Amino acid sequence: MVARIAIVVSLCLCAGLLASPTTAPSTAPSTAPTMPPTTAPASLAVKFPTPAELFEKIRKLDEDNSKLLKVAFFDISDPITEKPSEFSLFGGERGLPLRNLLDRLRKAQQDKDIQAVLITLGDTTINLAQAGEIRDQLNELRHANKKVFVYADSYDTVGYTVATGATDVCLLPGGEIMIPGIGLETMFYKGTMDKVGIQADYIQIGEFKGAEEPYTRTGPSDELRGELTKLTEAIYEQIVDGISLSGSLTGTLSASPRCSRRPSVIVTKSRTVRLSM
């Protein structure tokens, strides 16, 4: 009897333990958000331009660039040559072919977008004939209603001959314009040849055939002196006429420096030349 009562009590206790939990939850639900969202809303996303918008921006940029002043720049610092330098594995001689320079000047003349041309003259080697060709091409640019600026630290006869084809001649403050006269020199070797016992054997045919005079005379004959004088006078007149015609001046020969001065000479304050259109 006692054993049966003990079994009943045990079953009741087991039923009570299964019906109710023994402990309460000690932590908060794990599903609650602990951080703000890491992604921005869809309305704040970056918007890339469409191809049509890109083309429109490029077109506006081209229009803005077309409104800018376009100036063709030529830096003449290398010697002017009559032909391109020959190919060399070790590098050929530096030089700017005259034909290439003239072709580039013609392209600048024909380009409607170019409104002015700027030329800087450095320590270059140009003969008088080359300077005349460059000046003539600059005159063509002037006739095409294009501004032409020539700048140099100082001018000699050849450099100023080039500059006379420009609309504006620019000179560094303190620079000089030195245009000396024309002179020719001829060496005579007869005195030296007499000292070493050498006698030249020539036959002169004609009074003005003086090619052998350096070897048969110690000084020029009157005929040779006259021919050299005519040559120097012709070169001098060519220089004066070129400067006067390009500068719209009178071509009268005079010792006054005004004959070799252009009406518009701009003295710049630095190496930068300001172009005023």
Image (spheres, grey):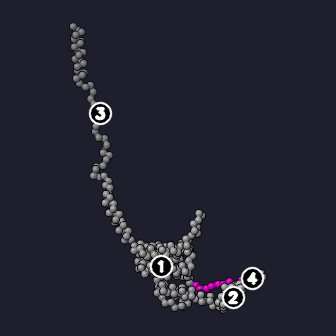
- Front residue of this view, candidates 57 and 186: 186
Any part of residue 274 in sight: no
- What is the distance, in whole Å, between disc 1 and disc 3 at their CAs? 95 Å
Residue topped by disc 1:
137
- Front residue of this view, candidates 212 and 184: 212
Residue 112, percent from left and from top:
39, 74
> What residue is at 42 percent from the left and 75 percent from the top?
110
Residue topped by disc 3:
27
Residue 108, percent from left and from top:
44, 74
Q: Earlier in the sequence, mark 4 or mark 1?
A: 1
> What residue is at 62 percent from the left and 89 percent from the top?
227
- What is the distance, in whole Å, between disc 4 and disc 1 at their CAs? 48 Å
- For residue 193, which numbered disc appears in the image? 4
- What is the distance, in whole Å, between disc 3 and disc 4 at their CAs? 125 Å
Residue 22 vertical placement versus 57 (above, below): above
Instruction: Look at discs 1 and 3 and give the one toward the viewer.
Output: 1
- Is residue 1 highlighted in magenta? no
Residue topped by disc 2:
204
- For residue 52, which numbered disc appears in the image? none
> What residue is at 22 percent from the left and 11 percent from the top?
5
Residue 109, percent from left and from top:
43, 76
Q: Which residues are magenta?
A: 180-189
Q: Name the secondary structure under disc 2.
A: loop
Question: Which amino acid type is shown beneath numbered disc 4?
Answer: Met
Q: Is there a contact, CB below 8 Å, between mark 1 and mark 2?
A: no
Question: Which amino acid type is shown beneath numbered disc 3?
Answer: Thr
Q: Quadrant of residue 14?
A: top left
